[in-house]
Amino acid sequence: MEIKEDASGVTFWVRVQPRASRSEVAGVYERAGKGDAIKIRLAAPPVDGRANDECRRFIAELLRVAPSKIEILLGQSSREKLIRVQGVGSERVRQALESAPVRGKIR
């Protein structure tokens, strides 16, 4: 999984699955020819922005940052989303994802 870091934070791709029984990291999703994304199941429907809100909340909880630090740059109405997290480094994101309970394997 590629995590890009700059002076203000990191960006990475996620693939979400709304309407899951609970929000959780589900492994790695291989994006055809575009690199990998983290697959996240979300316990919210894709209605009225609820899945996006849950995505931000879940990632914030996972990384132990405020939800206001999480921004969806691309993919507001898509399952594939480019996420930006302000104020953290790539190593912190990688460690949080690797230590999360996962149904699948994080590479």
Image: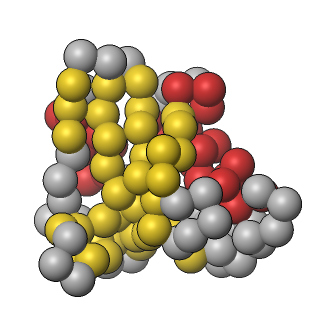
Left or right: 21 in relation to 106: right
Q: Quadrant of residue 6?
A: top left
Total tally of numbered discs in the picture: 0
- Residue 64, percent across and down? 48, 30
- Residue 90's x, y, as percent? 21, 35
Vertical arrangement, residue 92 with respect to residue 96, above or below: above
Residue 29, image x, y percentages: 31, 76
Q: Residue furthest right?
A: 48
| Residue at left offset 52%, top offset 60% | 75
Q: Is residue 5 above or below residue 80?
A: above
* Quadrant showing the N terminus: bottom left
In the image, is 53 to the left or to the right of 90? right
Residue 102 appears in the rendering: no
Residue 78 location (% of width, % of height): 56, 70
Residue sitting at x 32%, y 41%: 11
Q: Residue at x 70, y 49 (%)?
A: 53
| Residue situated furthest bottom in the rendering | 32
Q: Which residue corresponds to the image point at 37% horizontal and 18% vertical from the top-left?
A: 87
Image quadrant holding the C terminus, namely bottom left
Q: Foreground: 41 or 69?
A: 69
**Is the residue 90 above or below the residue 72 in the image?**
above
**Can I make out residue 83 in this image?**
yes
Tell me which corner region of the image, top left, top right, bottom left or bottom right, holds residue 68: top right
